[in-house]
Image (cartoon, grey):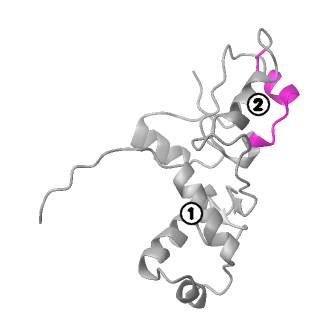
Amino acid sequence: MDVHDPCVNSEEARHEYGITPVREPEPRVYDAIIIAVGHRQFADMGSAEIHALGIDRHDPGSAKHGLESARPNGSATMTSFDRITCNPAVLNGQPSIRGMRLTVRRVIEALALYPNWDDLRAEYPELEPEDIRRALEFAAQNLDDQVFRLEPA
């Protein structure tokens, strides 16, 4: 089994989860492919590109169909994350806003400090309202649903 995620920091994945992601999936070696995150790169893959990874015993469109139809909210199309970029040369590949040195994580953290979008944009004038919406959507789609027991203070 291989894990490939163009936005993950390999060292962090190794440390946190004990897995070593591959840089690129090998062609024609996989019996099955699970696309578990909604990165734009995966959404843009056509059936021929998915098929080239090894899904030659199945309908080559099946993985693409699964990507498009298996949304948490049941919608048939994927939310566009065209404003969220992952570039290994910028901020170590962390998801960022439009290639700027401003990560999705920082936008979410800043929203906790500046819940009023106008205040947030005064602090980060390069942010557009659509950037904030996409950062929230991206964060929501990439969070695991976990229950955390909170102890009283």
Q: Is residue 14 above or below residue 58?
A: below
| Residue at the image position 72 percent from the left and 16 percent from the top | 29
Residues rendered magenta in the picture: 43-55
Residue at mark 2 = 64
Residue 64: quarter of image: top right
Q: What's the amino acid at mark 1? A: Leu
Q: Secondary structure at mark 2?
A: helix
In the picture, measured across the screen, residue 45 lies left or right of residue 68, that is: right
Q: Tell me if residue 45 is in the magenta stretch.
A: yes
Residue 97 is labelled as none
In the picture of the structure, the residue carrying the numbered disc 1 is 136
Query: 10 Å neighbourhood of mark 2: few (<14), some, or many (≥20)?
Result: many
The residue shown at (48%, 33%) is: 19
Q: Earlier in the sequence, mark 2 or mark 1?
A: 2
Residue 1 x/y as whole percent = 57, 21
The residue type indicated by label 2 comes to Lys
Please indicate whether residue 39 sits to the left or right of residue 10 in the image.
right
Residue 95 in percent (x, y) is at: 62, 59
Instruction: Tell me residue 41's x, y (percent).
Output: 75, 45
Q: Nearer the viewer, residue 52 or 109?
A: 109
Residue 101 visible at all: no
Marks 2 and 1, Cα distance to the nearest angstrom?
25 Å
User: Residue 24 location in percent, x, y?
Assistant: 71, 34
Q: Is residue 97 above or below residue 34?
A: below
